[in-house]
Image: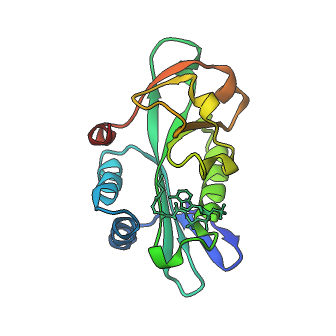
Amino acid sequence: MSDDTTAGTLTIRDVETGDEAEVRRLVAAAFPSDMEARLVEKLRHCGALVLEQVAVNADGRTVGHIAYSRVTPAAIGPGQGLQVACLAPVSVWPDNQRQGIGSALITASLNRLKELGEDLVLVLGPPSYYPRFGFDPVLARKVQAPYAGDAFMALALTEAGSRDLPIEVAFATPFEEFE
Ligand SMILES: CC(C)(COP(=O)(O)OP(=O)(O)OC[C@H]1O[C@@H](n2cnc3c(N)ncnc32)[C@H](O)[C@@H]1OP(=O)(O)O)[C@@H](O)C(=O)NCCC(=O)NCCS
């Protein structure tokens, strides 16, 4: 099902069949190499994506993309029943950056994840950017993962997401080459 949200002239919707080639070009252009574009395709092909959305402008151009993949809590402990997702990557075409597209995409997709029943979202990224959406490096210290430090942040979308911690988690297999 597609979830459409219009922020100004921007439409944010789920990725559809036929978007893949443009998404690959966009993600490869946003980052220094095509590593993140390949990560998105691997996550998609192994069925690890929880949510994948694009931002489309008034001209019909796909200007932004975001992907969330499944993170698996360890089989023991109070957090074993939590639904945990990882935000990675988020991309905006270089000539469209700093116009609010990334923020609109992140805000809309987090709302969608909440509707989908996700409890906790993890991200590894600039500590100057993600806290504005509620991501918190202090909360992430209760999540044992291959990542640590202030760039590793967490956002609880439900009460259980902050209550049923600490947890140990495993990321989807395609992340192994990023560790
Ligand atoms: C990060 C990204 C998705 C943000 O999207 P955007 O549409 O440019 O961002 P917005 O216009 O919504 O927000 C702009 C704000 O983001 C900040 N920002 C953008 N990229 C940033 C980065 N890599 N690190 C820190 N802050 C960043 C800007 O400084 C600006 O902050 P301000 O509001 O305090 O001035 C986009 O810049 C991008 O695709 N960058 C390259 C790929 C990347 O680094 N992805 C994230 C990796 S986790």
Task: Name above or below for residue 70 compared with residue 54.
Answer: above
Tell me the residue at 67%/50% (across/down): 133
Q: Is residue 29 or residue 17 the one in the foreground? A: 29
Whether residue 61 appears in this view of the structure is yes
Whether residue 3 appears in this view of the structure is no
Q: What is the x, y in percent for residue 101? A: 60, 69
72 lies left or right of 153: left
Residue 59 falls in which quadrant of the image?
A: bottom right
Quarter of the image with the C terminus is: top left
Task: Indicate which quadrant contains ligand 1.
Answer: bottom right
Considering every residue shown, the one lying at the far bottom of the view is: 59
Task: Name above or below for residue 33 compared with residue 134.
Answer: below
Tell me the residue at 64%/37% (across/down): 136
Q: What is the x, y in percent for residue 110? A: 63, 50
Q: What is the x, y in percent for residue 20? A: 35, 67
Q: What is the x, y in percent for residue 57? A: 57, 80
Q: Is residue 15 or residue 57 the one in the foreground? A: 57
Considering every residue shown, the one lying at the far top of the view is: 76
Tell me the residue at 39%/70% (across/down): 26
Tell me the residue at 58%/45% (across/down): 127
170 lies left or right of 121: left
Q: Count every numbered label the image shows and give the total.
A: 0
Q: How is the image coloured?
A: rainbow
